[in-house]
Image (spheres, rainbow, N blue to C red):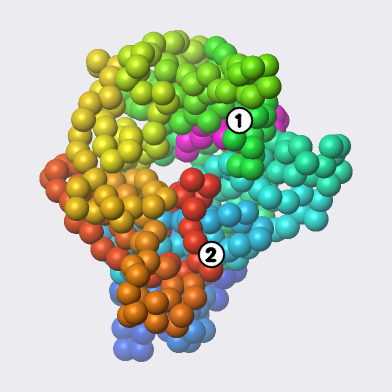
Amino acid sequence: MNQILLPSSSSSSLINQTLTLNLIPGLPNDIGALILSFISYSHHGRLKSICKSWKLFLSSKALISLRHSHGSRSLSHLLCIFSQDPSVASPYLFDLQNLAWCPLPPMPCNPHVYGLCNFTSVAIGPFLYVIGGSVFDTRSFPLDRPSPSSAAFRFDFCTWKWERISPMISPRGSFACVAVPNSDRILVAGGGSRHKLFAAAGSRISSVEMYDVKRDEWVSLDGLPSFRAGCVGFFVEDGEENSEFWVVGGYGESRTISGMFPVDEYCRDAVVMEMKNGNDGKWREIGDVWKIGERIRLGKIVVVEDKDHRCSGVYMLDGIDILRYDMDSNRWQEESHVPKEERCTLSSIGFVALDGELLVITVKKGVESGENRRCLRQHKKGRSLYIQIYNPKRKTWRSLTTKSPFVNKLDFSNAVMCNIRM
């Protein structure tokens, strides 16, 4: 019997079982494996029920290796959406090309904590990471005061299971986080204990850490120049050996109005850590990225990556305006606008980058008509997501509508989104 042509690292018992079974009758297994590897990831759940050999192969690391070895043509660009605490409600994968949804298992539950929010999610290869956040802990006092979490979890798409990994050194939520391109490392910076139930409260920290995936350990790096939470991070490569970790926006110190009501002091500047030959360096301050009076705080920021996971553009959604950050001038420049004819239908807005494009996602508001009310009664879940897609290279917009799989209305002010290449 023919064997699947796989990288030498794929030597697990699961793969060995796959090699003894015929994938497609009448075809060599290497050809059968190649055909199956080009099928969109969103269809794999249904295909696993066809036969044992397909289930074993589609659940193996061999499939991941084969898909990546054939480049971006065979990869599916998926969006993972966490509507709320992932230990309570299952996150969903969304395949934009096929308008298909796939639920993931809930994250392991800790009986002592609840209300997880303001965590961060990143993906590296076939792994999805959920890091930090803000929670309520039944073991703390007072009970109604949220605390930051240092917990970290990883979801393995091959085994379809969650596992707990080493916790961060400093607990944090609302922090900058980025996966270093072409490297098994994750960087986190800043953060605090703010919870979604409290508009302006919580601690801030300046701690910076790096996670080594292979060693499963966190290492402290040089801290931020000042306390900062609610910030955004991205990674910029300048040549083969030099790279930079950028941290933009957020809030630092706070002040009170009438001595009672806390108000955030938003950061207008950016700070950059220079990393040479993969080693961390010192921070330098870039200065204000917008002028006084131009805006109060940053809008939602996303980073567009190329096929090699390198930053090709940083964009911000400010109301209905999409702005692009120009590093040379250290200013946000106008890029485009959300199409005018759809502004009246916008509610809570999600903003994310996927496969080189910008997605503006909104929950469609109901229209007071007999037909619509009848549909809502028939589909209680049944809210639709309206997705407007902007291509920065072509400067064009397109749109589509898909039914939301979430039971409750999706609140993008609290939802966490992460893109995955599988």
Quadrant the C terminus occupies: bottom left
- Residue 138 is left or right of residue 106, and the answer is right
Q: Residue 268 — which label?
A: none
- Residue at mark 1: 200
Q: Is residue 147 left or right of residue 131?
A: right
Foreground of the two, 211 or 368: 368
Figure check: 2 above or below 123: below
Q: Residue visible at 31% across and 83% down?
A: 27
Q: Can residue 349 be seen in this view?
A: yes
Range covered by the magenta-colored residues: 168-179
Residue 116 at x, y percent in the picture: 66, 48
- In the figure, 267 relative to 320: above or below? above
Task: Pick whichever of labels 2 and 1 is earlier in the sequence.
Answer: 1
Amino acid bearing label 2: Asn
Q: Position of residue 131 (x, y in %)?
A: 61, 42
Give the structural element (helix, strand or loop) at label 2. loop
Gap between marks 2 and 1 measured at Cα:
25 Å
Residue located beneath label 2 in the image: 408
Is 420 positioned to the left or the right of 316 in the image? Answer: right
The residue depicted at 36 percent of the width and 55 percent of the height is 362
Q: Is residue 383 above or below residue 334?
A: below
